[in-house]
Image: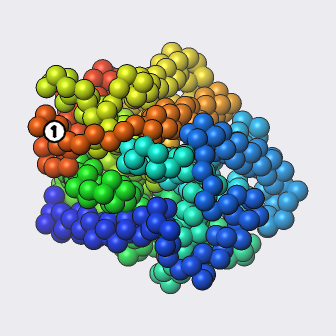
């Protein structure tokens, strides 16, 4: 561990902190203010798109109608994506003549990009045509991120609006179009140009064959990379144009782009905490969420950096120079600090982009990304999903605080009653049920264990990581799993769909239920939720819920692997 390594960590944190207020205030204007920015340009584009959809700008829906519209839009998009992948061999912009994907891979990929997961059971540069990369995959990178923002807004509106102030929770089409027109597309255009200026490629050229200095031939994959790379990070998607993802020099050519990629992953989730504070008319509420997320992030990156800075425990007793740390699976250009930081950032948010192979991390270093996802990816989290996931934990925290003082729990002046707590617990139970259910099935099945490249506890960690990544809609992998087979592709696809859409339903229901509740003025027994004490309670609840749920599985995976490796036993 070095001073420069810690400096890199704090610089990225300070950059995210600096952008939280201006970006959060901007998003508040976009979604909640009648005076939206750039009315003569972006406003006109918004108006044209709304008229094409036949939806007035002032339209609103009940939570059930909002959810029905979201589901219909999403699964129509999934069908279109499936068709594009199955027929890509007959479609244009396929200079390499790639064949159609198999049925199970097309299903897995369509579910993956629909759900903002971007799990990839394939090598992008040898499987997907340019048309598939842009029209099927990058398109979902925009729309899935916009849908996540919309769901977060429904819950935030339910918690912050006064009863009778609005007849509904908003309209899905309006929220989606505003997210695309005002936030995702403009930022993507600006940063795409920045990426291109630093060497990220953007072209439609056929792959190039070059002669190396040794006289051998090498094929260089080409394509429209920069346009997909930016929204992959900005929308916390994570799917790489190349199999090596952000370790590939055409996706991540230097330290500037590496920094910008991590910054883009966090900027919208962090900004949404400020947006929520503006919606609540109490900015302390937003900063409490930001503080809890920040504390969890800094602890995670410290553990990961410390673990990777030392020797792999299996090699610690050998007479080797371990000063460089555990460089296995790391990109030399980025080193230990940036690899540990990137792994923590990408699994704190449901991004899944990687600049190092998590499978090669030390047992404890690899456990950090796994735990980040097992906590529900609420440490800033995915675009929209991080905010609504943390707000669910907020409701659970105020419920626990209410039990301790013998009062009906309330948040922002609205009472949290039985219906809301049932939905909260449903949300909390779906997540581990899907992960542990599928992981347990794979661990005792021939199709599950037959895909592993490692035995023992590390093999179990690979299974746990795969289903945790899928259900948490992250998309990163330990990279030691041969998942492009029917059983894995199908079960992972269902895990991704369940982790996205089954968990959205209780979130929308809570938003709709809270919308109609009367706001009660705070009294002497009201538990304050806008300060450091509540942020600390929130951190404790997130950690305890995750620990109680997944600690037994972790002890059989990375924890026991660490002690076995330290004693010289490897598999």
Extreme-top residue of the structure: 444
Q: Nearer the viewer, residue 122 or 472?
A: 472
Instruction: State the count of labels.
Output: 1
Q: The C terminus appears in which quarter of the rendering? A: top left
Above or below 133: residue 78: above
Left or right, 17 with respect to 125, comes to left
Left or right, 513 with respect to 527, comes to right
Left or right, 369 with respect to 288, comes to right
Left or right, 445 with respect to 486, comes to left
Picture quadrant where residue 367 is located: top left
Extreme-front residue of the structure: 164
Q: Nearer the viewer, residue 21 or 571?
A: 21
Q: Nearer the viewer, residue 378 or 505?
A: 505
- The location of residue 316, given as percent across then percent down, is 18, 42
Residue that label 1 marks: 523
- The location of residue 232, given as percent across then percent down, is 53, 60
| Residue plotted at (55% across, 51% down) | 170
Above or below 522: residue 50: below
């Amino acid at each position: 561990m070095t001073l420069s390594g810690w400096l890199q960590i704090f610089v990225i944190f300070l950059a995210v902190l600096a952008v939280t207020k201006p970006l959060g205030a901007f998003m508040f204007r976009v979604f909640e203010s009648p005076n939206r920015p750039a009315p003569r340009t972006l406003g006109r584009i918004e108006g044209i798109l709304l008229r094409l959809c036949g939806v007035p700008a002032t339209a609103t829906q009940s939570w059930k109608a909002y959810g029905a519209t979201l589901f219909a839009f999403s699964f129509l998009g999934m069908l279109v994506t499936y068709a594009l992948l199955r027929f890509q061999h007959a479609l244009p912009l396929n200079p390499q003549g790639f064949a159609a994907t198999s049925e199970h891979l097309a299903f897995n990929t369509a579910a993956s990009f629909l759900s903002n997961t971007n799990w990839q059971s394939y090598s992008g540069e040898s499987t997907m045509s340019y048309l598939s990369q842009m029209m099927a995959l990058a398109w979902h990178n925009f729309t899935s991120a916009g849908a996540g923002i919309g769901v977060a807004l429904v819950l935030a509106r339910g918690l912050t609006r006064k009863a009778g102030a609005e007849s509904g929770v908003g309209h899905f089409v309006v929220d989606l179009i505003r997210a695309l027109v005002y936030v995702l597309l403009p930022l993507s255009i600006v940063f795409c140009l920045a990426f291109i200026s630093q060497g990220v490629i953007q072209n439609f050229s056929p792959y190039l064959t070059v002669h190396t200095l040794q006289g051998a031939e090498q094929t260089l994959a080409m394509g429209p990379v920069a346009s997909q790379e930016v929204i992959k990070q900005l929308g916390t998607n994570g799917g790489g144009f190349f199999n090596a993802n952000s370790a590939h020099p055409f996706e991540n050519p230097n330290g500037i782009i590496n920094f910008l990629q991590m910054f883009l992953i966090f900027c919208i989730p962090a900004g949404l905490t400020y947006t929520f504070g503006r919606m609540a008319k109490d900015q302390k509420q937003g900063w409490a969420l930001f503080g809890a997320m920040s504390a969890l992030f800094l602890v995670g990156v410290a553990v990961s950096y410390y673990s990777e800075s030392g020797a792999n425990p299996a090699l610690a007793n050998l007479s080797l120079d371990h000063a460089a740390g555990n460089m296995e699976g790391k990109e030399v250009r980025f080193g230990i600090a940036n690899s540990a930081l990137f792994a923590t950032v990408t699994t704190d948010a449901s991004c899944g982009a990687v600049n190092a192979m998590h499978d090669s991390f030390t047992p404890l270093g690899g456990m950090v990304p796994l735990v980040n996802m097992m906590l529900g990816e609420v440490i800033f989290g995915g675009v929209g999903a991080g905010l609504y996931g943390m707000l669910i934990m907020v409701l659970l925290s105020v419920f626990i605080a209410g039990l301790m003082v013998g009062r009906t729990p309330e948040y922002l002046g609205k009472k949290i009653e039985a219906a809301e707590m049932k939905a909260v617990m449903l949300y909390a139970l779906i997540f581990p049920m899907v992960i542990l259910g599928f992981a347990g099935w794979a661990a005792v099945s021939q199709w599950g264990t037959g895909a592993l490249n490692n035995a023992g506890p590390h093999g179990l960690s690979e299974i746990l990581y795969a289903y945790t990544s899928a259900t948490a809609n992250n998309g990163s992998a330990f990279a030691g799993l041969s998942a492009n087979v029917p059983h894995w592709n199908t079960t992972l696809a269902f895990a991704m769909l369940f982790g996205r859409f089954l968990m959205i339903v209780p979130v929308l229901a809570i938003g709709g239920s809270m919308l109609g509740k009367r706001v009660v003025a705070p009294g002497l027994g009201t538990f304050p939720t806008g300060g450091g004490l509540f942020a600390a309670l929130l951190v404790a609840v997130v950690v305890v819920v995750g620990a109680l749920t997944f600690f037994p599985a972790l002890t059989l995976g990375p924890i026991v692997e660490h002690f076995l490796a330290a004693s010289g036993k490897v598999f």
